[in-house]
Image (cartoon, coloured by chain):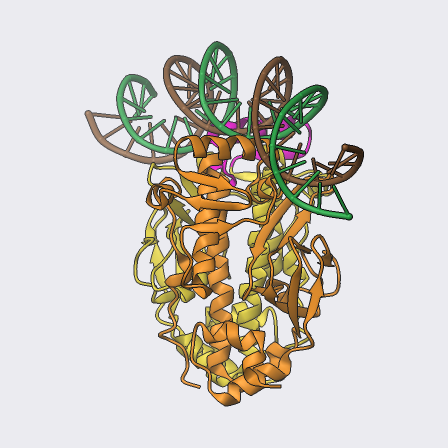
Chain colours: A orange, B yellow, C brown, D green
Amino acid sequence: MSPSSSCLVTKLSHYITLDDGHKDHLARLEKAERAFASGAEVYQAGDVARDMYVVKRGWLFSYTDLPDGRRQIVKIHHPGDIIGFPDVAMKHMTTTLHAAEDVVLCPFPKSSLDEILSTSPRLSALMLSIGLRDQVVFIDLLRVMGRMKAQERVAFMLLDLIARLRITNTSMTDTIRLPLNQSQIGDYLGLTNVYISRTFIRMEEEGLILRRADHLQLLQEQALAEMCDFYDRYSDMDTSWFPEH
Amino acid sequence: MSPSSSCLVTKLSHYITLDDGHKDHLARLEKAERAFASGAEVYQAGDVARDMYVVKRGWLFSYTDLPDGRRQIVKIHHPGDIIGFPDVAMKHMTTTLHAAEDVVLCPFPKSSLDEILSTSPRLSALMLSIGLRDQVVFIDLLRVMGRMKAQERVAFMLLDLIARLRITNTSMTDTIRLPLNQSQIGDYLGLTNVYISRTFIRMEEEGLILRRADHLQLLQEQALAEMCDFYDRYSDMDTSWFPEH
DNA sequence: CGCATAATTGATGGTTATCAAGACCAGTGG
DNA sequence: CCACTGGTCTTGATAACCATCAATTATGCG
């Protein structure tokens, strides 16, 4: 198993440089990769929390249902993302993981963290920082959901998606593929599919976005950023305090 | 400086047993405690992220404003809480910290984490878990804000507050002191002060709660928990995978 | 082509915001 | 002791925003 084939190594190398010892170590943590078809539910809320996953290919999302059937999608996952990290702190999974299209995942056991914490303060600091950065991202989203209207919420979602895709794909332009239907977008933004439709149409009429097939183009990124007061948390991480090794 | 006088030691001892070496170490991280009057803003969004704080006395909250003046309170802090943890991952503070009443705080520099990560895998695991647990709590709140109505949101807030207060104060009954006005509660739940007033009145008429002065009693805790599908994340943490030392 | 899924459109109603006025309350100073 | 003040809570009227329901029109796919 060559270190470079590891999803986790690829993911973490975006933030700090890893020496070969670290790379070997991380690569050994991974189990065999697994594929899931579009629509599959990889795990359910309430399952015992045992593994985390790195996304190798495809989009997924995590959601929870209310007893009466209302649904909230809490996170959209892209290639390179770590899935299930917050559930490490819990005995049971708190969300259900749904494949939005055909996907490939690299599982690794949550007990891996024990090893990382015991052997590499620097990697530990990175894992901690990723967790805390994600918390800031949730706080941003909370502000959006608590205080913003439909159009602002859509703007925020689009900017957040494109900012995250740009981390790993520096050639990203202003156009993204959006493999989610309007009901799913509604469940993410706390709105209905009907109102998502109306909002998209209005934003298109106003020249903010352009839709064709399942692709979406941001025509006025600056205007969109202003209307939802968007900050890119992904490019503002502070790694200066990290331990040396 | 005796170890037992440290806010951080008191806080962390609730989760795992600390030996004297750990206690001494943690106690040395703390700076002198500082008092703030009700209404004071301890730090502002945008300030350089340098310190974290443990709350020794009083309630505070963290908020962010939108450019047009709308406000979202993102976290209510109680004695024992760690404030500013997510901002460790950022170069700048992402929220403003407001004292809801007279408070006392114990600051400690965020570079302390470097030391903890380098010397104690077990403490590192605890810090990581607290961060991840908080992320789960934000996800729960996101679900509330995205999909629940006013009365359900209020129920969730009250249950969350009382669950957290019960961690450190096992003699908590069904009555809490609530040093927040209705505008602040509205800013926390994404509603207006007017609608908070109407919702409290309706919940009191329905026999769910009882208000007197600044105290609030939960008359039907079970019914409140069912209407907002409440889970107590604070008593469901998994520490089984922690390293030994 | 036929089918299922997704998106759109229209009509109506519910929930919450907004605005404005009044009630209550604790503290303050004359 | 009492008017005055500022803050908080309450109440009523109206409007904005979004949900809901139902029907229709794309869209994609075997």
x 46%, y 65%: residue:
A168
Q: Is residue A243 above or below residue B138?
A: below
x 49%, y 40%: residue:
A211
x 47%, y 69%: residue:
A129
What count of labels does the image hold? 0
Residue B38: in magenta span: no
Residue stretch rendered in magenta on the structure: B186-213
Residue B61, given in percent of the width and then of the height, sits at: 44, 50
One can see residue B75 in this view: no
By secondary structure, the bulk of the magenta-drawn segment is best described as helix
Residue A44, given in percent of the width and then of the height, sits at: 73, 57
Left or right placement of residue A98 versus residue B185 in this view? right
Quick one: A116 or A18, which is closer to the camera? Answer: A18
One can see residue A2 in this view: yes
Quick one: B33 or A144, which is closer to the camera? Answer: A144
Left or right placement of residue A224 versus residue B206 in this view? left
* The N terminus of chain A: image quadrant: bottom right
Left or right placement of residue B222 versus residue A186 in this view? right
Residue A156, given in percent of the width and then of the height, sits at: 45, 45
Quick one: B15 or C20, which is closer to the camera? Answer: C20
Residue A138, given in percent of the width and then of the height, sits at: 50, 53
* The C terminus of chain A: image quadrant: bottom left
Q: Is residue B219 above or below residue A111?
A: above
Quick one: A220 or B149, which is closer to the camera? Answer: A220
Q: In this view, does B223 lie above or below A91?
A: above
x 74%, y 58%: residue:
A46
